[in-house]
Image (cartoon, grey):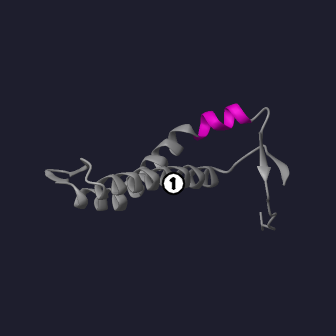
Amino acid sequence: MEYFRIWKLSFGSYLLFSIIIHMSLGLVFGMLAFFISLLGGNVTFSFGYANFQGFVAGVLNLLFAPALTSLMGLFIGLITYLPFRWITGKTGIKFLGKFEEEETDL
């Protein structure tokens, strides 16, 4: 493992990162709701005027939670990109991990 410091992140990369993080969070919430519905818990899903409960609501949560949280990640990424650039512009962000460098035509 090695450290890697990022000084500037493009707008598209930041949005993609935000969407992936929020989709992962939605998948966790959807799976949690699904498993609770399998155990007979009180799970609900509302879509407009339609309200679902029980196992059907658990399946719908599993399907729709990642999609809806991805949309939320898109909007949050749009709002937070400039503050992110301002905060990280002076010090950058240091990551620990395994990284691969790619050649680009920029």
Q: Which residue is mark 1?
A: 24
Q: Secondary structure at mark 1?
A: helix
Instruction: Please tell me how crowded label 1 is: few (under 14), some (14-19), or many (20+) other residues with Cα within 10 Å.
Output: some
Q: Quadrant of residue 90?
A: top right
Tell me where residue 57 sits by quadrant: bottom left
- The location of residue 15, given as percent across then percent down, is 56, 51
How would you classify the magenta stretch by its main secondary structure?
Answer: helix
Question: Magenta span has 84?
Answer: yes
Residue at point 34%, 57% (across, down)? 34
Is residue 90 rendered magenta in the image?
Answer: no
The amino acid at mark 1 is Ser
Residue 37 is left or right of residue 30, and the answer is: left
16 is higher (above) or lower (below) than 83: below
Looking at the image, the residue that sits furthest to the left is 49
Spot the residue most to the front.
Answer: 39
Start and end of the magenta stretch?
81-88
Which residue does the image show at 41% across and 50% down from the upper left? 29
Q: Is residue 100 above or below residue 30?
A: below
The quarter of the picture where the C terminus appears is bottom right
Q: Residue at x 13, y 50 (%)?
A: 49
Residue 5 image point, x, y percent: 81, 45
- The residue closer to the viewer here, 81 or 20, is 20
Residue lying at 41% horizontally and 56% vertically, measured from the top left: 31
Measuring from the top left, give residue 24's x and y in whole percent.
Answer: 51, 54
Percent position of residue 103, x then y: 81, 68
